[in-house]
Image (cartoon, helix red, strand yellow):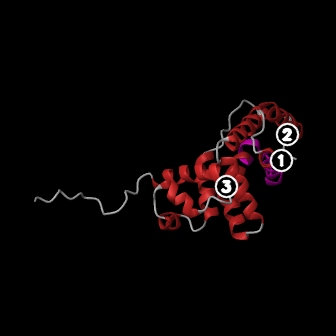
Amino acid sequence: MTRAATSARSPGRPRTGVNAVVFAATLSTVHELGYARATVDRIAAAAGIAKTTIYRRWPTKGALVVECLLDAFGPVPLEGAGRAELMSSAIRWIATKIGEPGVGDAFAGVFSDAVSDPALREVLSTRLQDPYRLALQEALGEPENRVLFFIDVVVGTLLHRMGMTGEPMSEADVAALVEMVLLYFPDDAGPA
């Protein structure tokens, strides 16, 4: 019997695409079971990998979910001719993202866990919130406190609706949210 040619790669599962597989499994597991029941064991099983593979990359479920959300959100689209268009597009973008299967559930769950977990709160703040806050500050020319207020109002409202109804906010309600927020951030106002 002849031996098969050996490959040049090391034994074990190929590393390419592991993050994408784990992120997809995380969102589908959270969507199917809810955040609390989407354990690392269940996510690993859905991804077809060992849970040690997950823990080598992310020390906790919360850290995994934050990275998964970063991947799902991508960069904030800062599009528009003026402040109103830019803010409107950012609000509609986050509303759409939160409405994607598993994303709103994952965001609400990790946010809820962070309330009583200072280490997770730090990861959530520095890894997820800060990049978007800084991009918005630069694009809007607004100080940190006003951009944080913008994020709080928009994300808080969208997650509240998801938590109370299990459904993303309707387009009509997103349009009303845009109108309300723009009253506080008028096109012709400078930083307060």
Residue 128 image label: 3
Quadrant assignment for the N terminus:
bottom left
x and y, in percent, of residue 147 in the image: 79, 49
- Which numbered disc flags the more N-terminal residue, 3 or 1? 3
- Secondary structure, mark 1, is helix
Q: CA distance from mark 3 to mark 1?
A: 16 Å
* Residue 138 lies in the magenta stretch: yes
Q: Quadrant of residue 174?
A: top right
- Which numbered disc flags the more N-terminal residue, 2 or 3? 3
x and y, in percent, of residue 56 in the image: 50, 67
The residue lying at 66 percent from left, 43 percent from top is: 76
Q: Nearer the viewer, residue 46 or 114?
A: 46
- Secondary structure, mark 2, is helix
Disc 1: which residue: 153
Residue type, label 2: Val
Whether label 2 touches label 1, CB < 8 Å: yes
Residue density around tag 1, few if under 14, some if 14–19, many if 20 or more, within 10 Å: few
Disc 2: which residue: 181
Q: Which residues are magenta?
A: 137-156
Q: CA distance from mark 2 to mark 3?
A: 22 Å
The residue lying at 48 percent from left, 68 percent from top is: 52
Residue 71 image label: none
Residue type, label 3: Leu
The residue lying at 75 percent from left, 41 percent from top is: 167
Residue density around tag 3, few if under 14, some if 14–19, many if 20 or more, within 10 Å: some
Q: CA distance from mark 2 to mark 1?
A: 8 Å
